[in-house]
Amino acid sequence: VDVLLNSLSDDYISNSVALLSEKGRFVEIGKRGIWSMDAMKEKKPKAEYFIVALDTLHQENPSEFQQLLRKVCVDFDAGRWQPLPVTVFDFATQFKDAFRFLRLGKNIGKVALRVSTASPSSSSLYD
């Protein structure tokens, strides 16, 4: 893999790094349990390592953030990007299945729980 966008943490990072080519680019968007520059250099000395704080970029560098958003939108429109798949489970009847699915660690994309739009007079999930 030449470019890896990572949000995993702790022990999972080493699995991602193992997939990275010798001179690849590792873009870290996670916040907790991320590697230092030194840790990355130890495992992949020729790779480039970028830590990107997407949650604060819009405040710290608004022009760079706007440029990034424009590029992503243009690339989506051109078909260079595809949205991540979403696996949806019903909250009321499948929440345990959703957690079992996540525990397997084989999901790609997002896992979501759908909450029905029942009226307030409906019986509670906790009854």
Image (spheres, helix red, strand yellow):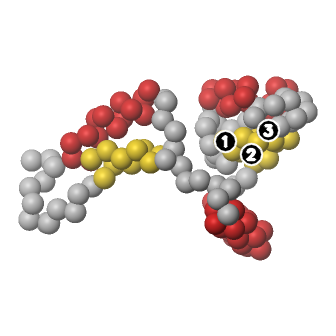
Which residue in the structure is indicated by mark 1? 6
The disc at residue 47 is: none
**How dense is the environment of label 2, judged by Cα within 10 Å: few (below 14), some, or many (20 and up)?**
some
Q: Earlier in the sequence, mark 2 or mark 1?
A: 1
Q: Nearer the viewer, mark 2 or mark 3?
A: 3
Which residue in the structure is indicated by mark 3? 2
Would residue 7 be visible to someone looking at this image?
A: yes
Q: Foreground: 7 or 127?
A: 7
Horizontal and vertical percent for residue 80? 68, 56
**How dense is the environment of label 1, judged by Cα within 10 Å: few (below 14), some, or many (20 and up)?**
some
Would residue 61 be visible to someone looking at this image?
A: no
- Give amino acid for label 3: Asp
Q: Earlier in the sequence, mark 2 or mark 3?
A: 3
- Give amino acid for label 2: Val
Left or right: 103 with respect to 54?
left
Left or right: 124 with respect to 80?
left
Q: Nearer the viewer, mark 1 or mark 3?
A: 3
Residue visible at 81% across and 31% down? 21
Q: Foreground: 106 or 83?
A: 83
Residue visible at 48% across and 35% down? 107
Horizontal and vertical percent for residue 36? 78, 37
Residue visible at 30% across and 34% down? 97
Q: Are marks 2 and 1 in contact (CB under 8 Å)?
A: yes
The Cα atoms of the two marked residues, 2 and 3, are separated by 11 Å
Left or right: 58 with respect to 92?
right
Horizontal and vertical percent for residue 49? 81, 42
Q: Can you say whether 65 is above or below 105 in the image?
A: below
- Give amino acid for label 1: Asn
The disc at residue 27 is: 2
